[in-house]
Image (spheres, coloured by chain):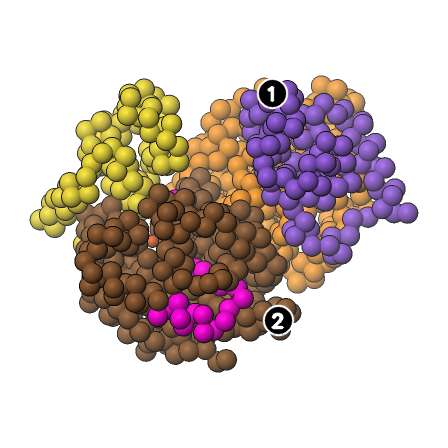
Chain colours: A purple, B yellow, C orange, D brown
Amino acid sequence: MIDRAEVDKVALVDYWLSRMIFDLSRDPANVAAWRKDRNAFMDRYPLRPQIREAVLADDLKILTRHVNAYLLRFYFGICGMSEPELLARLHALKEKTDG
Amino acid sequence: MIDRAEVDKVALVDYWLSRMIFDLSRDPANVAAWRKDRNAFMDRYPLRPQIREAVLADDLKILTRHVNAYLLRFYFGICGMSEPELLARLHALKEKTDG
Amino acid sequence: MAEFVGSFAASHGPLIARDWDKLTPRVRDWLGGSFAELGRRVAASRPDVLVIVAPDHWTNFFIDNLPTVCVGIGAEHDGPPEPFLKPRFPHRKLPGDGRFARHLLRTALTSGFDPALSHHLALDHGFCLPLWLMKLDPLPAIVPFVLNSLEDPMPSFARCLDWGRLIAKAVASYPEEVRVAVLGSGGLSHSIGEPTMGEVEEDLDRDCLRLLREAPDASLASSLEEKLRNAGNGGHEIRNWVVAHAAAGSRGFDAFAYAALPEVFVGCGFAEWKTAS
Amino acid sequence: MAEFVGSFAASHGPLIARDWDKLTPRVRDWLGGSFAELGRRVAASRPDVLVIVAPDHWTNFFIDNLPTVCVGIGAEHDGPPEPFLKPRFPHRKLPGDGRFARHLLRTALTSGFDPALSHHLALDHGFCLPLWLMKLDPLPAIVPFVLNSLEDPMPSFARCLDWGRLIAKAVASYPEEVRVAVLGSGGLSHSIGEPTMGEVEEDLDRDCLRLLREAPDASLASSLEEKLRNAGNGGHEIRNWVVAHAAAGSRGFDAFAYAALPEVFVGCGFAEWKTAS
Ligand SMILES: [Fe+3]
Ligand SMILES: [Fe+3]
């Protein structure tokens, strides 16, 4: 279960992470730059160090908190993560949360 | 006097003319392209023929109807029209409207 | 005078288009049949204008300027930008009705509402997936009514009821001879990009459908707030059904088809409200 | 509990910054002195948060998504992008108060209002010109309340009163120990890019000031609708004064300085409302 009441989801939104993913969703040139050099691409955005690390580590647990879930799904698509893998990794988070 | 009640100003807004001027206001590269070749720059936008002609002719009477006045003022600034000239040309319209 | 001729609702989901050719025949036939039945009902109401209430799936808007409600007042709209939908619904432009949309906008602004406006929108799968499968020919003029049901904070269910009534008021006060219908697009339960991604909550869906059929407005709003609070994110799109519900006068709800379809990640429902006319 | 500590209003205009060094000493001194007096009054109210009600002069928004009201919920905001203001007010970042702004946003959404939200705004001269000349040090946290007073259709004056009351309600219900003030920015009469460009309508301005001092809310709204209908476009920014007026409980209006200044194209007024505290 996702308890929306327990956290202020709006407060957790990370603008620059969201912006980066949104920009990737808008322009194939950004996707090409991203695929070529993630670090260089991220340098375009004032990302907090912990967000940057979470991106580099594909840390879904952290990323899901800070960006809209629809954008996140798109993001893992352009990263080349298959849908079954994304589902498996998301479901693993659920089990952790439940337990 | 401007009678806002007499016309539906919202209906008159020309989206692509507005878009073009807004884009000019956002990016010096657009201004450079505009200064180099107005026609080529306008080709980027699906402008109606009468709007395109009004742009080429600096036809303030037509342009004032179809784009927000603040954007229009900016536009004539980037066109190099001095403020006194803009004022004179706008005031001339008023006299026509009054009379 | 304009006439309110019908109110309808349908689910949507990208996978319905993306995986159409790979769906099991049972699911594809059921979806195709249900959307076709919806299309027949919409067509039977002979709308000149179809107000589609749907979210924007990060197509036009971002969190630097995220409207709660935005009315699309353009004379035309761009077709869907999604690669999975473009080939199936290849309309590069869809007709709008700027005149009615401006009337709706002004009615809202003078009746205690605060819509954003857009002179130019692209209509994503929330708008175009139902249009594709309903096969309306010709397309009525589309007035996009973009309601935030995608990112917190969203409008309350009570406010969605207010907005539905406002649409009805705008139709009733429009002096043109135009037939207007409403389509709420989205829901029922689904979850996208969350730990529960792919799950369909059939019990929740049936509860929501029952509430739309039976509950008076006040308890409808509070019950839906309660039920959706911890549901998957996509379920929040039922807000768009609630707008259609109130536009129809909050009565005569007929959910003529429902199936929980994990194959497309969505609890798929289809509904029509009986209207006065 | 938060406290509503003051409500203020000031005119703005790009020429005040652009031509500052070329203004006649009389005009420059009057403007500098009036803004300084406003700054003293604002500082005396010791606000932790300053809600600035101003239009967006095509800095953040365009007609593809033009909000009626947008609340800036960012923890910080970008400084002014205008070349004429940047060197004078060189703040690249201004502090926000995301927490209060989110409370304001939620209070609106649950009280029958439909604000857009923004996590990231640049604050143009409507926000930053008064901040520059008021010389508040340190700057309070700024909560941008962007109200469309620039492009038709705009919110009604009656709705601006509603929004002012909503701000007061949000302050009254905020559980933190925070002192909140409001600044309405814009007007009085001016005309930009129109046939009447540069004209200042002093009689209109004095009428508007009189109405704010004397008129009960209902006639204030209808009188302003009537008076502004055919006025120059910039006069519509007086909507932002009306929000500040209602936030202060629609009483105690004190316009402590006014001058018609064709030199900067603006009828320049400065005001403070007496608040309960
Ligand atoms: Fe959706
Ligand atoms: Fe202004």
Q: Amino acid at mark 2?
A: Glu
Extreme residue in the right direction: A99
Residue B10 in the image: above or below residue C198 = below
Coordinates of residue A67 in the picture (x, y in percent): 67, 41
Report the span colored magenta.
D37-58
What residue is pinned by disc 2? D177
User: What residue is rendered at 46% in x and 66% in y?
Assistant: D182
Magenta span contains residue C36 = no
Measured Cα–Cα span from mark 2 to mark 1: 49 Å
Q: Quadrant of the N terminus of chain D?
A: bottom right
Badge 2 density bin: few <14, some 14–19, many ≥20, Cα 10 Å: few
Residue in the foreground of this view, choosing between D157 and C112: D157
Per the image, label 1 sits on a secondary structure element best described as helix
| Image position, residue A51 (x, y; %) | 69, 40
Asked where in the image residue A70 lies, by quadrant, the reply is top right
Chain name for mark 1: A
Instruction: Kindly identify which residue carries mark 1.
Output: A32
Does residue B14 lie above or below D44 as drawn? Answer: above
Q: Position of residue C219 (x, y in %)?
A: 70, 62
* Residue A88: quadrant of the picture: top right
Task: Name the residue: 42% across, 67% down.
Answer: D244
Number of numbered labels in the structure image = 2
